[in-house]
Image: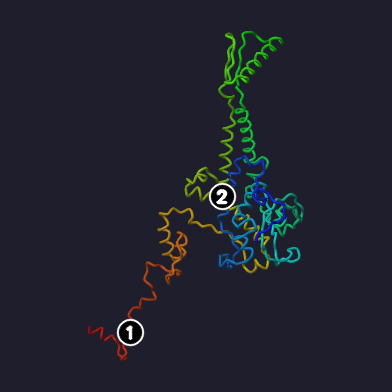
Amino acid sequence: MYKETGYVGSTQNPARIKISSRNERSILTTITNRIALDVASFNIEHVRTDENGQYLETIDSPLNQCLRVEANKDQTGRVLIQDIVMSMFDEGAVAVVPVETNINPILSGSYNIYSLRTGKIVEWYPNDVRVEVYNDRTGRKEKILVPKNLVGIVENPLYAVMNEPNSTLKRLIRKLSLLDTVDEASSSGKLDIIIQLPYTIRSEARQLQAEDRAKAIEQQLKGSRYGIAYADATEHITQLNRPAESNLLAQIQYLTLQFYNQLGFTEDIFNGKASEQSLRNYYDRTIEPIVTAIVEEMRRKFLTKTARSQMQTIMGFRDVFRLVPADEIANIADVFSRNEILTPNELRQIVGRKPSSAPHADELQNRNMPNQKAVPAANSFKKPKGGESNVEDQEKV
């Protein structure tokens, strides 16, 4: 039966990704969310390779379970990768902390990792870092001091573009803040009108008289049910249709374009209209450096020298067929099957079909060529039971 926990609760998930207030209203949140989803689409696994670094098999280890199935009580492996990327973009660097192991990592390097969480680095020391990480047992975020060799520290490969004080993104954020200020001022309910009085206001007495006249019109408009006021026949009222123009919007458009170019990003990637070449540049220039930074740091910190000497490593795999149009799948399947690259069951998995139970469905074989095992050798004849050669019978015929 379920029971009361007795812990301090919260209306929101405290382990959820939270973007700092300086970035949440900018264009950064939209871009980081798109990039984080694309990075999380990679399959990051604990694998074994051969002497040439080629993939051999996936190791069913607790670390692989964290990366592929369940990272912690609150996050799957894919959500953990997304959390790493968004936190890294927000702060410039993020800590990946093993919060649950079978033995103390400080006492021995041969330990298994059962749970991983991201943490915010609040202080840096020569050999340690102070990390703010969520404690899933108390429900609170705590600051702990951990050695650098036991925690994965993933730095943003695009730090110079996104996190430097004078980077393109920071300049864009400041311009967007100014644009928000202008929009709030323009929508504050001001009328922006000019009243031309029938007399000059060079003297102080005339200025006071003009101010009283402006306040009178303001009180009439404010106190009237329908916002109606009267003016003298000699007074002229001019309403400003819009505030004075500036080149702020043009600067924002220029900085946005420069930021996209520096990331290898295009607007078509957002709306799904990007070409194959644009997507290839996006994955090569933006996604691949981020995946490599995560994989290399996990390989360096979470695998011992003994494990690496046993050809254990961490690799990221991307399904290249996910972006292929349906009309090209048939041609690709024919080429890969004919050249004995993929088996029929592997091709069926790509197109979303269940594996076949046919005997040859898991064999690498060119289906366009006859089975060599079933073809008899040339000029070979089966010897009759009587011991006589069948060559004579061939000649008789």
- Label 1 CA crowd tier, 10 Å (few <14, some 14–19, many 20+): few
> SS at mark 1?
loop
In the rendered image, residue 120, in percent from the top left (x then y), is placed at 70, 50
8 relative to 345 in the view: left or right: right
Image-quadrant location for residue 40:
bottom right
Q: Name the residue furthest front.
A: 1
Q: Amino acid at mark 1?
A: Lys
Residue on which disc 2 sits: 285
Q: Which residue is mark 1?
A: 382
Residue 39 coordinates in the image, percent (x, y): 57, 53
> Seen in the image, is 212 located left or right of residue 288?
right
* Of 58 and 230, the residue lying toward us: 230
Residue that appears at 58% across and 47% down:
33
Residue 51 in percent (x, y) is at 59, 68
As rendered, which of 310 and 108 lies closer to the eye? Answer: 108
Q: Is residue 284 above or below residue 306?
A: above
Residue 341 visible, this orientation: no
Q: Residue at x 75, y 63 (%)?
A: 106
Q: Quadrant of the N terminus?
A: bottom right
Q: CA distance from mark 1 to mark 2?
A: 64 Å
Residue 46 appears in the rendering: yes
**Residue type at tag 2:** Arg
Which SS class for mark 2?
helix
